[in-house]
Amino acid sequence: MGNDQEMGMDGLVNGSIKIRETVAEKSANTRALQRWNVIHSGCERAQIQYDDWLETFHGAIARCQTPIIDLGCGSGNDTLYLIERGKRVIACDYAQNAIRNIHKNFPEVERAVCFDMAEGLPFGEDLTDLVICDLSLHYFTEQTTFAILDEIKRVLRPGGLLLFRVNSVRDVNHGAGMGREVEHHLYETQEWGYKRYFDLHDINKFWGAWDQIYLQEEAMHRYELEKVLWKGAVVAGVSYSGCSSERTAFR
């Protein structure tokens, strides 16, 4: 979205594979984008807070020497967590206002990039050891979700980690089961466009080909109402390079 130079995409290698969205999916995502730009119309660094979900993976984060991709960074909650721990961050979001806020609030980020992940990731292969998708992978059809996950695999180095959180089917405070069901557990609402909710079968369907290091359904209390979600850590294609004791600790 937007001008590449304005949004900080200069110097990036676009080796992505074009992902085909349906007309209906594109329309739903456009409505969601309008909503996200309103939400991110103004945000100051002092207002940004994060919860402790990444503490589960503190060892992997501490060891990471590559830039960490925060895919769907929003206001910068996880970006702030990573910066405070001395990490190099590439903050990415679909909403132009979110990226403008990142530029304003976090001048120390390595890059801030505005794009639609449903159209591919504008990065070369084997760029990073760590990608974070915090509540950003549950807005797409099954076909597009698998394609995005393939793109994440492409930019991860061998043995690299994807850390994620996605909606649970038990997240009734935040819309689970509401709207028109487009696919199994994927709903369309006028306000948010598409929104997917996951049960364990869904998690295994989308991440069954990955090496699952950690998986837990849990509650988050960062919002006014409790949110129920899945938290996971997965590796694409090869075994996790971290120590066996850490794998046990994750579980």
Image (cartoon, rainbow, N blue to C red):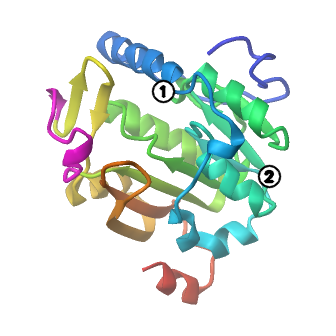
143 relative to 6 in the view: left or right = left
Start-end of magenta stretch: 169-183
Q: Residue furthest bottom?
A: 245
State the image quarter where residue 124 is shown.
top right
Closer to the camera in the image, 18 or 180: 180
Sequence-wise, the earlier of marks 2 and 1 is: 2
What residue appears at the point 38 percent right and 59 percent down from the top-left corner?
A: 220
Callout 2 amino acid: Arg
**Is there CB contact under 8 Å for labels 2 and 1?**
no
80 relative to 148 in the view: left or right = right
Per the image, is 170 magenta? yes
Question: Which percent across, then down, holds residue 121?
Answer: 61, 32
Residue beneath disc 1: 118
Closer to the camera in the image, 125 or 39: 39
Q: Which secondary structure, mark 1?
A: helix
Residue beneath disc 2: 88
Image quarter (top left, top right, bottom left or bottom right) of the N terminus: top right
Per the image, is 127 magenta? no
In the image, is residue 192 above or below residue 61? above
What residue appears at the point 20 percent right and 42 percent down from the top-left corner?
A: 176
Question: Which percent across, then down, holds residue 66?
Answer: 78, 56
In the image, is residue 150 above or below residue 95? below
CA–CA distance in space, label 2 to label 1: 24 Å
Q: Which secondary structure, mark 2?
A: loop
Question: Which percent across, then down, holds residue 231?
Answer: 41, 61
Callout 1 amino acid: Ala
Foreground tag (2 vs 1) = 2
